[in-house]
Image (cartoon, grey):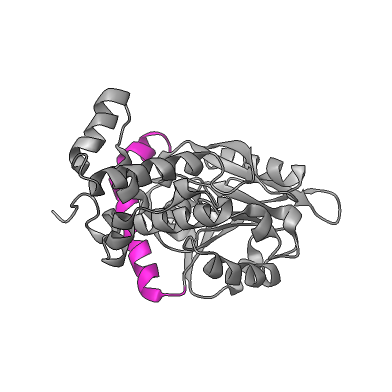
Amino acid sequence: MSTPLVAEVTEDAAGAPRPVRTVGVVGAGVMGIGVAQNLAQTGHRTVLLDLDEGILDRARREIERNVRFHGMMTRSKGGPALPEVMERITFTTDYAPFAECDFVVENATEKEAIKRGIYPVLDETCPPHAVFAANTSCISITRIGGWTGRPDRVLGMHFMNPVPLKPVVETIRGHFTSPQTIDIALGFLKQMGKEGIVVNDLPGFVSNRVLMLTINEAAWEVMDGVAPAEDIDRIFVTCFGHKMGPLATGDLIGLDTILYSLEVLYESYADPKFRPCPLLRKMVDAGLHGRKSGKGFFDYSA
């Protein structure tokens, strides 16, 4: 087995750098699966936590499928084979293994009430040197840091989907995030094969203040009968050179996540431009969440 990659985290009692050897990943949804897979493929011991055994079983199968699908390409570049990747991941419903984690990436549902319950447990369980990265679309990193006793070691890491294939991570500096924590995070991302672009903490940051507006407005255009979803996306792909139109992007992210993000932005800025489209809310209520449910603005059931 190859030697795990390491990153500088902080200094131990003797002043020597402490390596990131074990990473905790909270949430085994679409983003958590991608983060855990990317970590294991880049040599990190990974603890993937979810409170539902069924979700963990599905995550295990999805990671195996993804690694097999990309296996020939990654092995041709010296990447690890499937057994090696899977051996590095511990699937658990218990926070106890997080006592060994040097770094944690939290990927819970984009609802503040859910995330708020996680951080005090992490704070109590993880070692004092551990850094917490919130993988959030819109929620304030400064606020999240306030749920812990280590706000200087809390930052945002907004990974894009699919995580293993995206080379850049929006990295958010909260009000109390220390320069050392930013350096740790950028080094950690580099070892995942990614570049971190550092931005400051305001709801939505850079990407989602723009992206959520675009997806929401495209949903309004569908509801208003301006054009069908297929034609709206085709204009963005063919006229602007986008790889994917806004509605297909919303389906990929998850329309429930889009709705929750818009609600956070609407509440945070008190600006009507972020008001969620009624059609979007209706689709989420109907369980039409996009790719993960098999249907959203487009049908993925075939």
Position above or below: 135 against 231: below
**Residue 46 placed where, x, y %?**
53, 58
Asked whether 189 or 220 is in front, the reply is 220
Q: Residue 58 sits in which quadrant?
A: bottom left
Q: Residue furthest left?
A: 302
Tell me which residue sits at (57%, 54%) in the image: 268
Residue 21 shows up from this direction: no
Position above or below: 28 against 10: below
Magenta range is 51-78
Tell me which residue sits at (31%, 42%) in the image: 218
**Residue 90 placed where, x, y %?**
49, 65
Viewed as shown, does residue 174 lie left or right of 234? right
Viewed as shown, does residue 295 lie left or right of 63? left
**Residue 156 placed where, x, y %?**
60, 49
Asked whether 100 or 109 is in front, the reply is 109
* In the image, residue 56 lies in the stretch drawn in magenta: yes
Tell me which residue sits at (56%, 43%) in the image: 205
Q: Residue 190 sits in which quadrant?
A: top right
Position above or below: 287 against 186: below
Position above or below: 211 against 294: above
Viewed as shown, does residue 155 lie left or right of 245? right
Residue 205 shows up from this direction: yes
Q: Main secondary structure of the magenta part?
A: helix
Tell me which residue sits at (55%, 53%) in the image: 270
* In the image, residue 103 lies in the stretch drawn in magenta: no
